[in-house]
Image: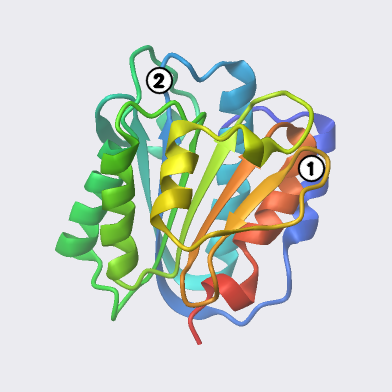
Amino acid sequence: MPFIFEQDDFRFHRIQEATETQSNAVIFAMRDISGSMGAEKKYLSRALLFWLVEYLRHLYEKVEIRFIVHHTEARMVNEEDFFKLGESGGTYCASAFELANNLIDAEYPPNAWNIYAFLFSDGDDFDPNRTVAEIGKMLAKGVNMVGYAKVGISYSGDPLDKMSSLLTALKEAFPLERSSIAGGLGILRGERDFPLLCAVVQGKDHILPVLREFLRKERWRHE
């Protein structure tokens, strides 16, 4: 296991369902490692991405996972480093999507691959409009799912009333609707034919609900 879990974390294995094995999939697992990502934010992003990767590995016969970390620049790393790295510096989330888009164009044609991209960051993006543009390019390629979670904030009330620069830009650019808010968890989701979902994740109790949202079949799985 690439990082240490607490005992309670093992309850999240219940997200697994009986599924029919499919063919090829590539997962772009992207994590913000900038200076603003403190210990709690790192934990939440690592836990969410770990379980997403594990689930999709069980679903497809062939799964390739490209681990991408970023601050102002993005780079690919191995799985062990992906779950351990933490660095200083600013945040350009677009750099991760640019790298993923380049890899799709070079290696993963959407007509041959099921494509998933998940980014976890605190949302302090220095250029959110550039990130929105890269996400738009990815969605236009016909990918299965793009997921973004803003992690590790703490305040009462509706978390979508205090969105980060990136969430605000995404809401303005794409047709996203608010979902029900419970316990400080906020969801912005596209319709079935628009596979973009954003979440505000404030603590460990939100991990399972967010995983269920990201992995809901009727939204992210091609028929």
- Left or right of residue 177, residue 175 in this image: left
Q: Amino acid at mark 1?
A: Phe
197 to 48, vertically: above or below:
below
| Number of on-image labels | 2
Residue 137 position, x and y percent, is 26, 60
Query: Residue at image x 83%, y 40%?
Result: 183
**Foreground: 80 or 167?**
167
Residue 31 position, x and y percent, is 44, 35
- Left or right of residue 154, residue 134 in this image: left
Residue 118 position, x and y percent, is 47, 50
Q: Can you see residue 1?
A: no
Label 2's element?
Answer: loop
Label 1's element?
Answer: helix
Q: Quadrant of residue 81?
A: top left
Label disc, if present, on residue 34 of the rendered structure: 2
175 to 67, vertically: above or below:
below
Q: Residue furthest bottom?
A: 223
Q: Amino acid at mark 2?
A: Ser
Q: Quadrant of residue 205?
A: top right
Check disc 1 and report the residue beneath it: 10
Q: Residues within 10 Å of mark 2 (few under 14, many from 20)?
A: many
**Foreground: 214 or 133?**
133
Q: Can you see residue 120?
A: yes
From the image, state whether disc 2 or disc 1 is nearer to you: 2
55 to 222, vertically: above or below:
above
135 to 190, vertically: above or below:
above
Query: Residue at image x 53%, y 71%?
Result: 220
Q: Give the alpha-carbon distance from disc 2 to disc 1, as whole Å.
A: 28 Å
> Looking at the image, what colour scheme do you see?
rainbow
